[in-house]
């Protein structure tokens, strides 16, 4: 295990009716809020009205930024920065999934930066100060509710890039599992694949003796495998929703990356797919993951896959480790298909003529991944296998 510093500062209010804590959470930071949300799901399911009632009854002033896109655009970030400056906002409240929260993180940093917030993604600028952020999560997937990462899309240059900063870690997040009950099946499934992919990116590591972290990681994977099919059948099953929601936060709040080198090649590849084809992040990950696993599996790392087979899929121990590993990869693929997720890039509208360009862009800043380093040819091979 490597050295690490533990810091997970977001206060979590988890469970039914935790929205009651909203006004006291807000008032710690001031009285003027940027209320940011997506394309309108929060208006349909009543969360918007609940928030507005609280704001009105507690005399909290607010200004709205609506219409934040899935795969949020830098244009929305700039709109938000302008609103914050114009109204002297004390707190940004992101209500939605990862896209809304990520957009708000870029806004929060952008308020104190003179240039274009896209510079954070280009590594041309680093956030040194940010408006505080709170979140109300409506989709279990990204972990953005409890981490300092954001992924922003620039539609002009067809780039989707990320940045991270401790300054944009949410100050508080309200996680009410009932808020995820209105999710379409596709988003629930994609969100689960995203949670599992976050675990894979950290679990498949060459750092040795990370026993405690590995067992926590397997627990999150088993939780997803157990509860996602229940949620698909019973969208209003509270405990199933609750377990997925907490899995989302634990999978990407740094906890399971402490003390080890992590991978992130599958995410780097997926971001190239959604940058050009605007596909749902978790769907892209579910398609690529089994092919990434098949591609990187080797005699030197087979023991990690054997652990995965044994502890996550409960595949009986046999002497042929490679065959155990391959069974676990097959189980992974079958599981995503069982959730109704397409299994090829072609099915989600990706065209073969773009594979090479996307592979090239994925390695623009150098080889990706650490479990196994991937160069352009490797990425292209994985794209072709996934096609
Ligand atoms: O926009 P609205 O109308 O709200 O609808 C959204 C959106 O269409 C809908 N939705 C959300 N909650 C709902 C709901 N519909 C009904 N009922 C609800 N309760 O779901 C759709 C997708 O929302 P989005 O926020 O895009 O999904 P997700 O949470 O999966 O976020 C994906 C984005 O996060 C980035 C991805 O790349 C992608 O851009 N990621 C962010 C990470 C981070 N910050 O740490 C890590 C991830 O790996 C990921 O890259
Ligand atoms: Zn992800």
Image (tube, helix red, strand yellow):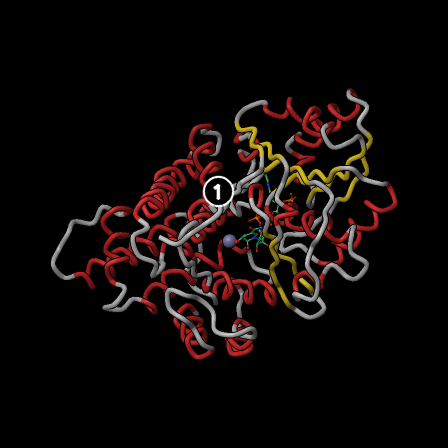
Q: Quadrant of residue 216?
A: top left
Look at the image and tell me in which quarter the C terminus lies.
Answer: bottom left
Q: Which residue is mark 1?
A: 248
Residue 318 can be seen in this image: yes
User: What residue is rendered at 36% in x and 61% in y?
Assistant: 290
Residue 340 can be seen in this image: no
User: What residue is rendered at 46% in x and 58% in y?
Assistant: 285
| Outermost left residue | 319
Coordinates of residue 104 in the picture (x, y in percent): 69, 47
| Outermost right residue | 86
Please tell me whether residue 386 is drawn above or below residue 130 in the rendered image: below
Coordinates of residue 208 in the picture (x, y in percent): 30, 56
Left or right relative to 257: residue 77: right
User: What residue is rendered at 70% in x and 38% in y?
Assistant: 93
User: What residue is rendered at 49% in x and 47% in y?
Assistant: 5
Dot 1: few (<14), some (14–19), or many (≥20) neighbours within 10 Å? many
Disc 1 element? helix
Left or right relative to 193: residue 52: right
Q: Quadrant of residue 288?
A: bottom left
């Amino acid at each position: 295990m490597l050295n690490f510093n533990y810091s997970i500062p977001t206060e979590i209010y988890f469970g039914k009716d935790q929205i009651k804590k909203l006004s006291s959470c807000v008032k710690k930071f001031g009285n003027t809020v940027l209320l940011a949300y997506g394309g309108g799901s929060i208006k349909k399911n009543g969360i918007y009205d609940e928030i507005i009632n609280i704001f009105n009854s507690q005399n909290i002033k607010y200004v709205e930024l609506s219409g934040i896109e899935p795969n949020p655009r830098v244009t929305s970030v700039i709109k938000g920065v302008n609103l914050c400056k114009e109204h002297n906002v004390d707190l940004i409240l992101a209500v939605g999934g990862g896209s809304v929260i990520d957009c708000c993180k870029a806004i929060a940093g952008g308020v104190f930066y003179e240039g274009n917030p896209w510079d954070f993604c280009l590594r041309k600028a680093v956030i040194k100060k940010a408006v505080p952020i709170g979140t109300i999560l409506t989709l279990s997937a990204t972990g953005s509710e409890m981490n300092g990462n954001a992924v922003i899309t620039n539609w002009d240059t067809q780039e989707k890039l990320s940045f991270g900063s401790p300054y944009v870690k949410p100050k508080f997040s309200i996680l009410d599992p009932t808020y995820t009950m209105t999710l379409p099946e596709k988003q629930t499934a994609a969100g689960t694949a995203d949670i599992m992919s976050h675990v894979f990116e950290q679990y498949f590591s060459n750092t040795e003796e990370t026993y405690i972290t590995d067992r926590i990681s397997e627990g999150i994977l088993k939780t997803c495998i157990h509860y996602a099919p229940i949620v698909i059948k019973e969208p209003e099953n509270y405990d199933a929703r609750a377990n997925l929601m907490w899995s989302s936060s634990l999978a990407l709040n740094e906890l399971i990356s402490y003390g080890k080198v992590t991978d992130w090649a599958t995410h780097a590849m997926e971001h190239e797919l959604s940058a050009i084809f605007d596909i749902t992040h978790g769907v892209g990950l579910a398609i690529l993951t089994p092919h990434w696993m098949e591609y990187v599996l080797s005699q030197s790392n087979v023991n990690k896959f054997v652990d995965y087979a044994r502890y996550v899929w409960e595949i009986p121990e046999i002497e042929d480790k490679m065959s155990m590993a391959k069974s676990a990869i097959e189980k992974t693929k079958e599981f995503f298909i069982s959730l109704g997720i397409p299994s090829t890039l072609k099915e989600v509208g990706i065209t073969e003529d773009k594979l090479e360009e996307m592979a090239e862009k994925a390695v623009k800043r150098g080889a990706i991944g650490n479990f196994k380093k991937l160069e352009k040819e490797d990425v292209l091979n994985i794209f072709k296998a996934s096609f």
